[in-house]
Image (tube, grey):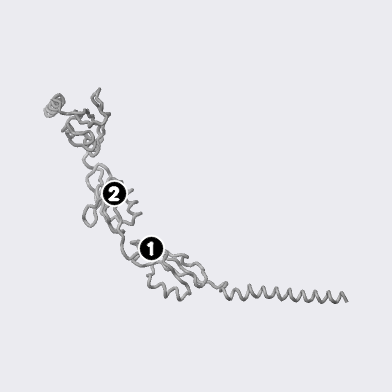
Amino acid sequence: MISDSLKGLLIHFSVMLVLGLGTTLIFFYVYLPSETNHGETITVPNLVERHYNELEEMLLQRNLRFEVSDSVYSSTYPPLTIVRQYPKAGNKVKEGRKIFITLNRANIPKIPLPQLKDKSLTHVKAVLNNMDLQIKAIERKSSPFFNLVLEATYNGKPVEEGTPIPVGSSLVLYVGDGYGKKSFEMPDLFGIEYDEALVVTNALDINLEPLNIKPGIDTAGQVLYVVRQEPLPATSINIGEWVKLWLDIKIDSSFYRQIHADTLTENVN
C-alpha cells in the first residue's frame, strides 16, 4: 500500500516536473523571442552625406529612428548633410533602434586667423589643415629665409592674426625664396633708447655682443641710451653679423656727441 502511494507520488512529481520544464522552454524559446524579435536584425544603412530631409522616410521604412546628437561644420560636405553616424553603416541592430547622427551646419562659422607670419611653411600648412582652412596658392618673395611665411592674403587683401574668416576659406601665402638681400647698411642707433635699438637689431637679424655700460653708474630703474656703436652707421654689414653697443643713462653730453660726430666723419672719409 505504501509502495503504491510512493509510486503515485513519484509519477505525479515527474509529470509536474515535465510540465514545468516544458513551460519554461516554451517561454524562453518561443514566446519571448516572438515578443522581442529575437534573432531578427536590421542592417544599419549608410547615412553619411545624406540630406537631413531624407532621413525620416529612409529610416521609417526600416523600422529605425534617429536623433541629432551633434552638429559641426566641414567644407567637405554640403550643408545639412550627415557627417557621422552611430551605429555605423553595416552594423546589425534590432527594430526601433535609434541612430545618432552628426549634422553639418548650414551657416559657415568664422574663426580667428592664427599666427602665420614668421612661421615655417610646413608649420603653417599643418595649422591651416587642422582648422579647415585652404591654401589657394604659394607665392615667392625676396627673403634670405627659405619657406618662411612673410604674409597671407584673403580675397586679395592682407590678413593679420586674429582676423575672423569663414571656415574653409582659401588663403594665398607669400613665403621667402631664400635669395633675399643678405647685406645692408648699418643704421644709426646713436641717441635712441636701448629697447628701441633692440627692436631694430632684431628686425634686421643682426646679433648683439655683450653690452658695454659705463662703469660706476646705477642702471636700476634707468632708461639706457645708445652712445656708441660698432660697426659705424652706414657701414655695409651682413645678416647675422655681430654688433657692439655702448650704453649710458644720458646722451646730452658733448663728449658722446663729439665721439659720434668724429666716427661719422671717419666713416665718410
Q: In the rendered view, does 268 fall on the left or right side of 201?
A: left
Which residue lies at the image location 25% right of the left edge and 45% below the top edge?
177
Residues tagged 1 and 2 counted as in contact (Cβ below 8 A): no
Residue 71's tag is 1
Q: In the rendered view, does 127 fall on the left or right side of 253?
A: right
Q: In the rendered view, does 59 fall on the left or right side of 116?
A: right
Secondary structure type for disc 2: loop
Q: Quadrant of residue 37?
A: bottom right
Disc number lying in front (1 or 2): 1
What percent of the width, then of the height, locates residue 7?
Answer: 83, 75
- Sort mark 1 into few (<14), some (14-19) or many (20+) by Cα contacts within 10 Å: some
Please, what is the three-letter code of the amino acid marked with disc 2? Leu
What percent of the width, then of the height, locates residue 115?
Answer: 29, 49
What percent of the width, then of the height, locates residue 134?
Answer: 30, 56
Which residue lies at the image location 37% right of the left edge and 67% below the top edge?
81
Which of the two residues, 189 or 42, is positioned nearer the viewer here? 189
Q: Say if 237 sits above or below 121 in the image.
A: above
Q: Say if 103 sits above or below 199 in the image.
A: below
Disc 1/disc 2 C-alpha distance (Å): 28 Å
Q: In the rendered view, does 46 fall on the left or right side of 80?
A: right
Q: Quadrant of residue 129?
A: bottom left
Q: Say if 145 sits above or below 129 in the image.
A: above
- The quarter of the rendered structure image containing the C terminus is top left
Which of the two residues, 123 or 30, is positioned nearer the viewer here? 30
- The quarter of the rendered structure image containing the N terminus is bottom right
Task: Answer whether residue 168 is visible to the viewer in this image.
Answer: no
- Sort mark 2 into few (<14), some (14-19) or many (20+) by Cα contacts within 10 Å: many
Which residue bears the numbered disc 2?
A: 116
Which residue lies at the image location 24% right of the left edge and 33% below the top edge?
241
Pick out the residue farthest to the right.
Answer: 1
Please, what is the three-letter code of the amino acid marked with disc 1? Ser
